[in-house]
Image (spheres, grey):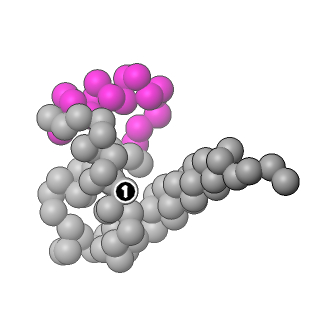
Amino acid sequence: MPRAELTDLEVAVLDFEREWLQGPAAKEQAIRSQFGLSGARYYQILGRLIDTPAALAYDPLLVRRLLRQRDERREARAARTRPID
């Protein structure tokens, strides 16, 4: 897997996302413990990271899944805020 363009933190974030199986509360604790980051900061990094060609090259299945999930969440939010005719 190519990783030349990714930092060690970015690789660790992608690896963490690929391997995470537990619930969201435990994930927040693990993020703090493993990365020393708040959940918000972690997700900012992840959000930018999955838009990069380097992340896609490193783990295409994971990045495509995360992009699909993000798009689904955006569509759901947009549907909730659209006015009903």
Asked if residue 34 shows in the view, the reply is no
Q: Residue at x 37, y 56 (%)?
A: 47
Q: Give the answer, above or below, for where 6 lies relative to 82.
A: below
Is 82 on the left or on the right of 22, as rendered? right
Return the residue nearer the eye: 16 or 31: 31
Report the span colored magenta: 19-35
- In depth, the one of 81 and 69 nearer the eye is 81
x, y (%) of residue 69?
56, 52
Asked if the magenta segment contains residue 27, the reply would be yes
Residue drawn at (34%, 72%) of the image? 52
From what the image shows, is residue 23 above or below residue 79? above
Please tell me in which quadrant of the rendered image residue 57 appears. Answer: bottom left
Task: Identify the residue under disc 1.
Answer: 47
Secondary structure under tag 1 reads helix
The residue lying at 68 percent from left, 44 percent from top is 80
Q: Is the magenta stretch mostly helix, strand or loop?
A: helix
Taking the image as shown, residue 27 lies to the left or right of residue 38, namely right
Residue 40 within the segment the image draws in magenta: no
Residue in view at x 38 percent, y 63 percent:
50
Q: Position of residue 23 (x, y in %)?
A: 47, 26
Which image quadrant for residue 40?
top left
